[in-house]
Image (cartoon, grey):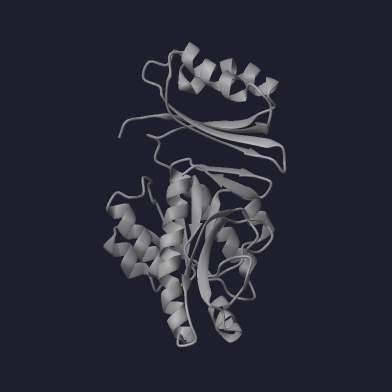
């Protein structure tokens, strides 16, 4: 895959931002391949994603920040630079439900997800055969109700050893503490089996069934200290009707969950997500 450089930025909306970025890349012999932008009228903020070819770029990308700093300061930018050739390290946390895990491992094996998976962590041993089939290490860390803190510390120790760029909760049915989340801000992706903000928390399909809803869905979001309230990356819905039992909704919901989680991870891997004000812009 050809390496490209990806500049993501957010700043107060004002004249000259796009011109300054384009001129900077041009002056340093870069070639813009894709440029997407969004101005938020409510917040007065401007977001932009610029992908450019760095082959003839006159600045070493490792030294990009120094010459770019005057522009960033002038426009009060929050920004980061990524390279498409970099393969992030993704660690998966999972409980007993295997549908999201199986889907992700298949997509990874087939080359759809450009990342490395050094480890799968679970609070149950049930999915170890799946991990072994894909030749990925699997460690079980039980989470007893009376000693969750010790279990979480073991998980944190494993994460420290394996240095993930981000973490995926593929139906990991434990609530992470605020301290855990704070160590990986905007780097933990969850799949919630509901079209948030409706039916947050446990057993959403059963509660949706009892309310007689006509659509169900799934939401993938970044994890924050507030349960199921982090910036939303991707969502999808499907229609249901009075003939569908709660079990039917669960079955249909699993299909949606797999699709939504894989999309969210792909957006994250391809540096297409920009977060601001607890929401996201997806440059898809």
Q: Which of 209 and 91 is in front in this view?
A: 209
- Residue drawn at the location 27% of the way across and 63% of the way down: 133
Q: Is residue 216 above or below residue 119?
A: below
Q: Nearer the viewer, residue 260 or 123?
A: 260
Q: Where is residue 236 in the image (x, y as percent from the top left)?
A: 49, 63
Q: In which quarter of the image is residue 32?
A: top left
Residue 134 horizontal side relative to residue 160, left or right: left
- Residue drawn at the location 69% of the way across and 40% of the way down: 41
Q: Position of residue 208 (x, y in %)?
A: 57, 79
Q: In which quarter of the image is residue 21?
A: top right
Q: Is residue 107 above or below residue 12?
A: below
The furthest residue to the right: 43
- Residue drawn at the location 35% of the way across and 65% of the way down: 102
- Residue drawn at the location 67% of the way across and 55% of the way down: 179
The answer to whether residue 65 shows anywhere in this view is no
The answer to whether residue 68 shows anywhere in this view is yes
Residue 13 horizontal side relative to residue 130, left or right: right
Please tell me how many numbered marks the rendered image carries: 0
Q: Nearer the viewer, residue 191 or 87?
A: 191
Q: Nearer the viewer, residue 177 or 258?
A: 258
Q: Position of residue 244 (x, y in %)?
A: 45, 85
Q: Position of residue 251 (x, y in %)?
A: 41, 78
Q: In which quarter of the image is residue 4?
A: top left
Task: Give the position of the N terminus as an image quadrant.
Answer: top left
């Amino acid at each position: 895959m050809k390496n490209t450089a990806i500049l993501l930025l957010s700043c107060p909306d004002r004249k000259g931002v796009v011109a300054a970025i384009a001129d900077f890349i041009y002056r340093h012999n870069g070639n813009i391949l894709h440029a997407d932008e969004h101005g938020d009228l409510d917040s007065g903020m401007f977001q932009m994603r610029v992908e450019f070819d760095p082959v003839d770029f006159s600045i070493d990308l490792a030294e990009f920040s120094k010459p770019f700093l005057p522009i960033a300061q002038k426009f009060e930018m929050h920004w980061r630079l990524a390279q498409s050739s970099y393969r992030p390290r993704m660690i998966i946390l999972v409980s007993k439900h295997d549908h999201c895990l199986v889907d992700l491992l298949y997509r990874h094996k087939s080359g759809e997800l450009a990342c490395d998976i050094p480890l799968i962590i679970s609070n149950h041993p049930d999915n170890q055969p799946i991990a072994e089939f894909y030749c990925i290490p699997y460690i079980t860390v039980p989470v007893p109700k009376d000693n969750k803190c010790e279990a979480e510390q073991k998980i944190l120790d494993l994460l420290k050893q394996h240095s993930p760029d981000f973490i995926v909760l593929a139906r990991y049915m434990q609530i992470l503490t605020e301290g855990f989340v704070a160590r990986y801000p905007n780097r933990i992706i969850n799949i919630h089996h509901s079209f948030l903000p409706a039916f947050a928390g446990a057993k959403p399909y059963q509660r949706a069934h009892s309310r007689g809803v006509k659509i169900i869905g799934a939401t993938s979001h970044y994890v924050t200290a507030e349960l199921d309230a982090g910036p939303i990356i991707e969502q999808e819905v499907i229609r249901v009707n009075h003939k569908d039992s709660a079990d039917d909704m669960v079955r249909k919901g699993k299909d949606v969950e797999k699709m939504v989680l894989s999309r969210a991870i792909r957006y994250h891997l391809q540096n297409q997500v920009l977060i601001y004000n607890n929401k996201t812009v997806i440059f898809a």
